[in-house]
Each structure stands twice: as C-alpha cells, then as structure tokens.
Image (tube, rainbow, N blue to C red):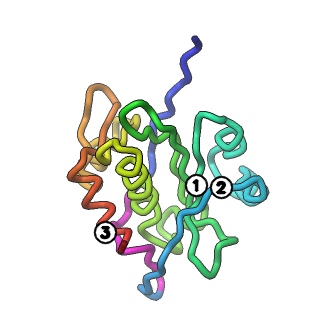
Amino acid sequence: MKSKKLIPLDFIVDKLTNSIQNTISGDSFDTEVLRFTNADLKQTTKNKGWNFNWSVEFKDNTKEVFKLTIPRNANIIQGLLSFSLEPDHVYLHLLENAPFNIGKNKLYEGVAGNLVAHACKVSFQQGFDGFVGFTAKTKLKEHYQETLGAYTLGGQRMVIPTEAAQVLINKYFKS
C-alpha cells in the first residue's frame, strides 16, 4: 500500500476568540462550520489567493473538508479544514485561513482556532476523547503547544489531548 505524504501544517493561531473577531471594529461574529461543497471550489483556487489545492482534498474520499462561515454570510468562506477519521483520533491534513484572514491586514482573528475546535468536537463525537493529531512544521511546534495545548509525539507529529480539546470546544461552541 502506498503511504500518503503528510504535509506539515503551518497555520497560525492568532487569537483564541469566542467566535471570530473583526480586527478593525473588534466585533465578534458567530460562526458555522459547514461541509465544503463542489460549488465552493470556484472561490478557493490559487488564482483567488488560496495556497492549497482544495479540489484535491475535496475529491479524496478518505478526507472530510469543512468551511468556516458567518451564519448570515455563508457564501464567504473564512477558512478551510481537511481531516480524516483514523481508528482512534481525528487527523488534520490541511487548515488554511482565507487569503483576507492572513497577515497583518487580516480581516478576522480566531479562524484557525475555530477550525481546530471543530476537529476536536468531531473527535469527541466519534468516541476518540477529543484526540486530534497532526504534523507540524518544526518552527511552529512550540506555538501549537502554547496556543492549542498540543504536545509532541516525536519528530513533527503532535496531538491535542482530551483536556486541551475540551478547552477549545468550550471556547468556540456554546452548546
């Protein structure tokens, strides 16, 4: 069996918010995490500023792809997440903020944390006790330890344990 290449993740958790927060006004907006659809592919291309080929993720039937949106503005994607369900955990393959949510002029903070919290929530729903695994770029391992409560399994592999997963879920999901 051919093993898939694991892409080291390099998303930045800019701020843990209660939803997503507008960087200009400071207003917070509730969010929804919805399944990514075929119709979403047109707005998530490299030509539109996205770094990853989300079409490849979407077509891979071993992965689930989700989008983060604001409820009354569901056509604007704030960020994307791709993960797979493993035998005992959720594994993050890709996570990307929308191009307008990256850098010093980003529009919203809290997008990455919100998507990771969704993966943690799915992990609990699947009976995995909140465990979420991923491969991190070496330079970001300490960042993920500090912001997500993740710890290193060895090399670049990291895991978010039960307690840290619950903290993220409590932060982003009211119910």
- Type of residue at label 1? Phe
Badge 3 element:
helix
Q: Position of residue 2 (x, y in %)?
A: 59, 14
**What quarter of the picture does the N terminus occupy?**
top right
Residues at circles 3 and 1 in contact by the CB criterion of under 8 Å: no
Q: Magenta stretch? A: 13-24
Task: Report the front residue among 106 and 33.
Answer: 33
Q: Is residue 101 above or below residue 140?
A: below
- In this rendering, position of residue 30 left or right of residue 166: right
Q: Position of residue 75 (x, y in %)?
A: 69, 71
- In this view, the residue farthest toward the top is 1
Q: Is residue 21 above or below residue 32?
A: below
Q: CA distance from mark 3 to mark 2?
A: 23 Å
Residue bearing mark 1: 66
Residues at circles 1 and 2 in contact by the CB criterion of under 8 Å: yes
Residue at (45%, 74%) from the top-left corner?
A: 20
Q: Earlier in the sequence, mark 1 or mark 2?
A: 2
Q: Earlier in the sequence, mark 3 or mark 1?
A: 1
Residue 23 is covered by the magenta coloring = yes
Residue bearing mark 2: 36
Residue 64 is covered by the magenta coloring = no
Task: Report the front residue among 86 and 28.
Answer: 86
Residue bearing mark 3: 171
Residue at (66%, 71%) from the top-left corner?
A: 76
10 Å neighbourhood of mark 2: few (<14), some, or many (≥20)?
Answer: some
- Type of residue at label 3? Lys
10 Å neighbourhood of mark 1: few (<14), some, or many (≥20)?
Answer: many
Residue 102 visible in image: yes
Residue at (31%, 48%) from the top-left corner?
A: 130
By secondary structure, the bulk of the magenta-drawn segment is best described as loop
Q: Position of residue 61 (x, y in %)?
A: 65, 35
10 Å neighbourhood of mark 3: few (<14), some, or many (≥20)?
Answer: some
